[in-house]
């Protein structure tokens, strides 16, 4: 549905987007991820024909953004970061205006407006001025505007920014409900959002494509070793606590397959560690046995998965090391995890 | 079709903001004052001339209508930047311009629609001054032809000024800059012919030709000269063309 080949946007002094290539299949939700200033908005603007690319091509539904902008525009619904609403207009009036300029046939427009207002849950404010609506409502009016002409592709630039947690959940659910009929690209720098809404992730940093994969693949690809959080308490309080901690540490280090033990802050009377395994080893059963056999209380034992957040930080922090091979990426991934919660 | 959609939207936002009312109120006030002054002078002069025994009555067309027309043109000069300032600057500031240019409509439709709305507001404003002139018909018989031509001239002149001011508005996000820049540009074009009164070189003749005011002189006398009409139409086309370029430049600059 979307086909991007070597897309580049160069300004006088800097390169905003640097040879990005990716494909998006019909009906997918793709998360466009990157730190602020990575080039997400610029890429989206090129896809919506707002900015012409300096180099490379982008095709939407088979039409090139440079050669056939009208056809592309007809098939794209776009929600920029700030919803493009006219504060003095009423919701219905605004949707009516947008419907007209997006080329919705006049006869079906009133029905269509009712539908999208229902879909985006803004029907209860239909006759209110948009300027008087809350941020959440305004965002949803923005979404309603983007889908009014039932486009094949939806491009949403940070659709949840500036919303409160409740509104974020509503907006996410709304976006998920739109998938299937529409191919959706949404940009964000909030990672849980991608984990929860998207099937695929495209990560860019400093204008360059860093990774593109499904959420699961990305997680498993980078998770080479297992990281486990362990919390232990002495059964009787008689022993000196520092000595106890030392003992526990030594014991954990002796478990086979353990590569590193890092002590963490813990509540008084408890010793807490993160334990990393060697590549491809399951260490949780061994750890549990070691603690119990030593006669201590095992308070807590759980694996710390590499969250998308960690992957993201690693990918965007040092893109040069990571680009060559996934194996190397996995090695790099193992390093800084220890201090995570 | 799209042009009309844009135009209607633009007009409705004019009348929802204080701009339309402010512009029309002050125009009515000032144009009314000028009208009163013109009529008062006319009455005094004609009384004097009757007392001095001149039998030829003074012409209302010449004394009132012409003076009202050129005064209205001056007031228009002040109102145009205020009407045009928000056309593009506002949309650039709020980001709604992104909605317009990513919609399947042409830039020319956006620009022409907006300009048309501004002209419509300007015409509504001029209509107020027509009410003043209509009062003349209660007491006298001014001929309608110079009046019609005069108002056609005002409309053409207004359209040309609005096109140029729309261009200034499309260059900035800031409405204050748009109004100041627009006024500066129009004032310059208004007074540019004053230089040509000093000498008769080619340069000053060219500059004189550019004056948006000089071309109105024939209209205000009730003379429809194609040359002047062509000038205004060219100005409109030129202003809208520049606006188009400026809108396009947004794409490769920002």
Image: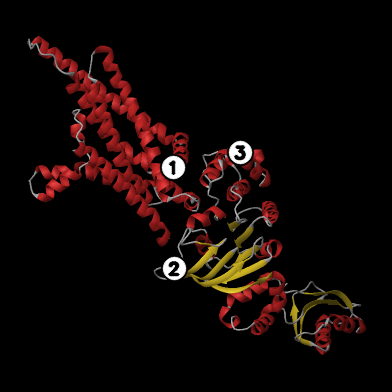
Total numbered badges shown on the rendered structure: 3
Near mark 2 (Cα within 10 A), the count class, few <14, some 14-19 or many ≥20, is some
Asked where in the image residue A175 lies, by quadrant, the reply is: bottom right
**Cα distance, mark 3 to mark 2?**
40 Å
The image position of residue A330, as x and y in percent, is 68, 82
Q: Is residue A90 above or below residue A237?
A: above
Foreground disc of the pair 3, 2: 3
The chain that hosts pointer 2 is A
Image-based side of A180 in relation to B46, left or right: right
Badge 3 element: helix
The image position of residue A13, as x and y in percent, is 40, 70
For the point 48% across and 57% down, the residue is A69
For the point 19% across and 21% down, the residue is B61
The image position of residue A134, as x and y in percent, is 61, 45
Foreground disc of the pair 1, 2: 1
The chain that hosts pointer 1 is B
Q: Are both tags, 3 and 1, on one chain?
A: no
Task: Identify residue for label 2.
Answer: A54
Image-based side of A6 in relation to B177, left or right: right
Work out whether residue B158 can be spotted.
Answer: yes
Image-based side of B44 in relation to A221, left or right: left
Q: Quadrant of the C terminus of chain A?
A: bottom right
Badge 3 vs badge 1, beta-carbon distance below 8 Å? no
Badge 2 element: loop
Badge 1 element: helix
Near mark 3 (Cα within 10 A), the count class, few <14, some 14-19 or many ≥20, is some
**Cα distance, mark 1 to mark 2?**
30 Å
The image position of residue A105, as x and y in percent, is 56, 42
Question: Which comes sooner in the sequence, label 3 or label 2?
Answer: 2
Near mark 1 (Cα within 10 A), the count class, few <14, some 14-19 or many ≥20, is many
Task: Identify residue for label 3.
Answer: A110
Task: Identify residue for label 1.
Answer: B3
């Amino acid at each position: 549905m979307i086909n991007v080949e070597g897309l580049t946007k160069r300004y006088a002094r800097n390169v905003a987007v640097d040879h990005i290539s990716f494909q998006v299949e019909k009906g997918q939700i793709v998360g466009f991820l990157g730190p602020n200033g990575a080039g997400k908005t610029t890429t989206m603007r090129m896809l919506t024909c707002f900015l012409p690319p300096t180099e490379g091509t982008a095709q939407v539904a088979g039409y090139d953004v440079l050669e056939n902008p009208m056809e592309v525009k007809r098939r794209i619904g776009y929600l920029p970061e700030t919803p493009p609403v006219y504060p003095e207009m009423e919701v219905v009036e605004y949707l009516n205006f947008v419907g007209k300029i997006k080329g919705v046939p006049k006869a079906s427009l009133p029905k269509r407006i009712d539908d999208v207002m229902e879909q985006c849950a803004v029907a209860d404010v239909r006759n209110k001025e948009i300027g008087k609506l809350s941020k959440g409502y305004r965002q949803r009016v923005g979404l309603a505007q983007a889908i009014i002409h039932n486009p094949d592709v939806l491009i949403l630039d940070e659709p949840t920014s500036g919303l409160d947690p409740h509104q974020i959940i509503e907006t996410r659910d709304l976006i998920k409900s739109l998938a299937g009929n529409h191919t959706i690209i949404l940009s964000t720098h909030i990672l849980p959002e991608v984990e929860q809404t998207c099937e695929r992730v495209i990560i860019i940093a400093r204008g360059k494509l860093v990774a593109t994969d499904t959420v699961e693949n990305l997680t498993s690809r980078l998770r080479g070793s297992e990281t486990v959080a362990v919390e232990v308490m002495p059964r009787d309080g008689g022993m000196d606590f520092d000595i106890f901690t030392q003992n526990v540490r030594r014991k954990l280090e002796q478990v086979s397959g353990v590569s590193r033990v890092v002590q963490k802050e813990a509540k008084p009377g408890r010793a807490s560690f993160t334990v990393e395994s060697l590549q491809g080893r399951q260490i949780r059963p061994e750890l549990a046995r070691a603690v119990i056999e030593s006669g201590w209380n095992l308070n807590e034992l759980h694996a710390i998965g590499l969250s998308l957040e960690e992957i993201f930080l690693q990918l965007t922090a040092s893109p040069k090391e990571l680009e060559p091979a996934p194996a190397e990426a996995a090695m790099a991934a193992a390093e800084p995890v220890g201090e995570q919660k | 079709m799209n042009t009309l959609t844009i135009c209607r939207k633009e007009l409705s936002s004019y009348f929802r903001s204080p701009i339309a009312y402010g512009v029309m109120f002050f125009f009515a006030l000032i144009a009314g004052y000028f009208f009163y002054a013109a009529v008062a002078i006319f009455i005094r002069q004609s009384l004097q001339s009757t007392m001095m025994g001149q039998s030829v009555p003074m012409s209302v067309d010449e004394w009132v209508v012409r003076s009202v027309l050129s005064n209205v043109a001056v007031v228009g000069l002040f109102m145009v930047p205020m009407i045009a300032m928000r056309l593009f600057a506002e949309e650039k500031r709020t980001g709604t311009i992104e909605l317009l240019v990513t919609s399947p409509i042409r830039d020319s439709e956006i620009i022409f629609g907006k300009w048309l709305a501004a002209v419509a507001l300007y015409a509504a404003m001029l209509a107020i001054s027509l009410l003043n002139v209509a009062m003349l018909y209660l007491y006298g018989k001014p001929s309608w032809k110079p009046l019609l031509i005069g108002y056609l001239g005002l409309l053409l002149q207004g359209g040309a000024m609005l096109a140029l001011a729309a261009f200034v508005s499309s260059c900035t996000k800031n409405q204050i800059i748009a109004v100041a820049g627009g006024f500066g540009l129009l004032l310059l074009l208004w007074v540019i012919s004053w230089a040509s009164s000093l000498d008769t070189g080619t340069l000053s003749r060219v500059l004189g030709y550019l004056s948006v005011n000089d071309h109105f002189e024939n209209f205000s006398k009730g003379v429809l000269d194609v040359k002047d009409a062509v000038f205004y139409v060219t100005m409109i086309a030129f202003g809208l063309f520049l606006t188009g370029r400026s809108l396009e430049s947004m794409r490769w600059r920002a």
